[in-house]
Image (cartoon, helix red, strand yellow):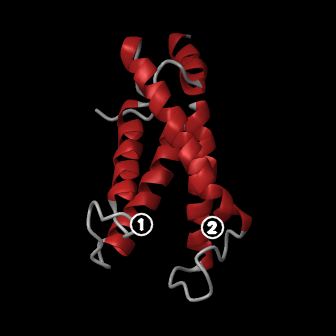
Amino acid sequence: MFRLFPEPINGPGAVGLLLVRLVVGLAFILHGWPKIQSPLAWMGPDAQMPGFLQACAAVAEFGGGIALLLGVLTPLAALGLAITMAVATFMVHVPMQHSFVGKPGEPSFELSAVYLVVAIMFLLVGPGVFSLDALLFQRRRQA
């Protein structure tokens, strides 16, 4: 059964989740930073994506990266990131027939697919015990 805040994973798995959260969270912050500077028009003047949806993606990447890094509101962050990466993969890369792993300098959808799967993983298993979610929501469960 799916739970919005599953029991936090302990032990070595928690360390693995922490490491993935830190690296992927930082990557999303760095990807989202230039977008959040011009959230309604970061795709350029010829973009077919409306400004509102560009802003949603910018907030999902930058804000979602911060949330992953801290392990706070992880399901919400993971959902936003998963949607953003699904759009990047299936509405941009796949229709343009980019390969999964391209040659150096060529576009590919490898990275967006990996980020999509990582976001889905956090949505399903949570951020682990070393997170603010575990600290905040585990106390509530025990009470």
Q: Which residue is depicted at the point 52% across and 10% down? A: 142
- Report the front residue among 6 and 66: 66
**Mark seen at residue 2:** none
- Measuring from the top left, give residue 9's x and y in whole percent: 40, 19
Outermost residue, front side = 104
Query: In the picture shown, does residue 5 fall above or below 106?
Result: above
- Kindly tell me whether residue 75 is visible in this rendering: yes
- Report the front residue among 107 and 80: 107
Quadrant of the image for the N terminus?
top left
**Alpha-carbon span between mark 1 and mark 2:** 14 Å
Label 2 crowd bin: few (<14), some (14–19), many (20+), radius 10 Å? some
Q: Which residue is depicted at the point 61% across and 81% down? A: 44
Outermost residue, right side = 37
Q: Marks 1 and 2: CB-CB under 8 Å?
A: no
Location of mark 2 (residue): 55
- Measuring from the top left, give residue 60's x and y in whole percent: 57, 55
Q: Earlier in the sequence, mark 1 or mark 2?
A: 2
**Mark seen at residue 88:** 1
- Give the residue type that dot 2 points to: Ala
- Give the residue type that dot 1 points to: Ala
Label 1 crowd bin: few (<14), some (14–19), many (20+), radius 10 Å? some
Query: In the picture shown, does residue 109 fall above or below 11?
Result: below
Quarter occupied by residue 39? bottom right
Query: In the picture shown, does residue 77 fall above or below 41?
Result: above
Q: Which residue is depicted at the point 48% across and 40% down? A: 75
